[in-house]
Amino acid sequence: MVTKTYTVTGMTCGHCVNSVSDEVARIPGVSEVQVNLASGAVTVTSEQPVDHAAVRAAVDEAGYQLVG
């Protein structure tokens, strides 16, 4: 298992958390997504390393921005 934490900006409520979680969870191989609204931390657990561009695209699709 691989765990990586990203920072997402623009989230302000529970709906934001759900949107980001749902989009990132759709990435093939992702087994778990945890989002901390206060810090903007999005922790992704997967079987293999997940492509950074795929995470960025999922966050963009949800309407938010991945930092870095």
Image: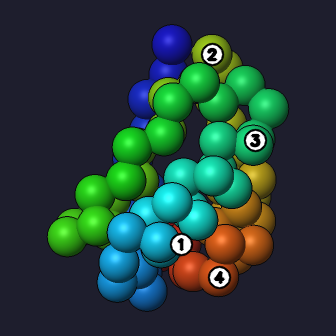
User: Mark 1: which secondary structure?
Assistant: strand
| Left or right, 66 with reference to 24 | left
Q: Is 33 rendered above or below residue 52?
A: above
Return the disc, 4 or 3, that comes first in the chain's sequence.
Answer: 3
Q: Residue furthest front?
A: 15
Measured Cα–Cα span from mark 3 to mark 2:
11 Å
Q: Dot 1, how many residues are within 10 Å of its Cα: few (below 14), some (14-19), or many (20+)?
A: many
Q: Is residue 20 left or right of residue 3?
A: right
Q: Are marks 3 and 2 in contact (CB under 8 Å)?
A: no
- Is residue 8 in view? no
Count the labels in the image. Answer: 4
Q: Which residue is mark 4?
A: 63
At 63% from the left and 16% from the top, the residue drawn is: 47
On screen, residue 62 above or below 55:
below
What residue is shown at x 53% (from left), y 72% (from top)?
66
Q: Which residue is mark 1?
A: 66
Q: Which residue is mark 3?
A: 27
The reply to whether discs 4 and 2 touch (Cβ–Cβ < 8 Å) is: no
Residue 20 image point, x, y percent: 56, 62
Q: Position of residue 13 (x, y in %)?
A: 35, 78
Tell me the CA gap for discs 1 and 4. 10 Å
Residue 34 spot, x, y in % from top left: 39, 43
Amino acid at pointer 3: Ile
In this figure, which residue is indicated by the disc labeled 2? 47
Three-letter amino acid code at the position of disc 4: Gly
Q: Residues within 10 Å of mark 3 (few under 14, many from 20)?
A: some
Which mark, residue 24?
none
Residue shown at 34%/84% (left/top)? 12
